[in-house]
Image (spheres, rainbow, N blue to C red):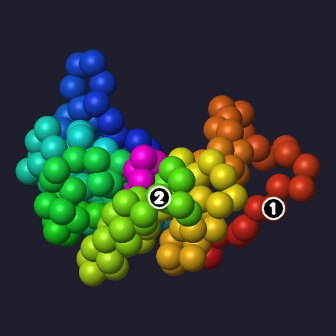
Amino acid sequence: MSMATVSLKKNTDSMSATDPSTLDHLLSLMHIHSSIADRPIFEITDTAAMMDFEETTRFANKLRDLGCRIALDDFGTGYTSYQHLKAPSVDIVKIDGQFVKDLHENKENQLFVQTLLDLADGFNAEVVGECVETKEEAQALRDRGVKYLQGYHFGAPIVERPWGTPNLRMVACD
């Protein structure tokens, strides 16, 4: 299944996840393109959600009602992470890279990541390991059951669309 990720982070004027005009625009787009509403994943940083938890939860729930998924980014960095997981609006948690760094040899990070994985499992949330930079970090996350990994170990982010890239395998949507 193809997916698009939309990041909702703090900007200079307001925050996308608490801006009514952003929500209205997204709801309009999802109604117009309802056949793809289950594909976008909206990322909300732990810090941004902390700014106005009630409004962010309302925002997330409206998008989830249309079939979109919600990811909590930078999980573990804010003191309200547990509250956010408890809300019915989180489908995916992205473990912050500071806990992934040197995971294969850092006992504190190992304990913290295992605790986050247990919490996510208890809330039926999928988990993404962020900022994976080495083969050892990737393996340490896989060994703990993390299915989704992202970071420079797999390639640098690019702006160009990779459609014309040789040997790129596209998977058909169901």
User: Which residue shows up at 83% across the image and 55% down it?
Assistant: 168
Q: Is residue 30 visible?
A: no
**Residue to which mark 2 is pinned:** 106
The image position of residue 138, as x and y in percent, is 62, 62
User: Which residue shows up at 21% across the image and 56% down it?
Assistant: 81
Which SS class for mark 2?
Answer: loop
| Amino acid identity at mark 2 | Asn
Q: Nearer the viewer, residue 53 or 103?
A: 103
Q: In terms of sequence position, does the residue under pointer 1 or pointer 2 come before the other? A: 2
The image position of residue 112, as x and y in percent, is 34, 63
Which of pointers 1 and 2 indicates the residue nearer the eye? 2
Give the crowd class for mark 1: few <14, some 14-19, many >=20 residues within 10 Å: few
The image position of residue 98, as x and y in percent, is 42, 47
**Residue to which mark 1 is pinned:** 169
Query: Which span of residues is magenta-colored?
Result: 94-99
CA distance separating discs 1 and 2: 35 Å
Residue 82 sits in which quadrant? Answer: bottom left
Image-based side of 164 in relation to 27, left or right = right
Check the image and name the residue furthest to the left. Answer: 54
Q: Nearer the viewer, residue 142 or 3?
A: 142
| Amino acid identity at mark 1 | Arg
User: Which residue shows up at 12% across the image and 48% down it?
Assistant: 53
In the picture, the quarter occupied by the C terminus is: bottom right
User: Which residue shows up at 11% across the image and 42% down it?
Assistant: 52
Which SS class for mark 1?
Answer: loop
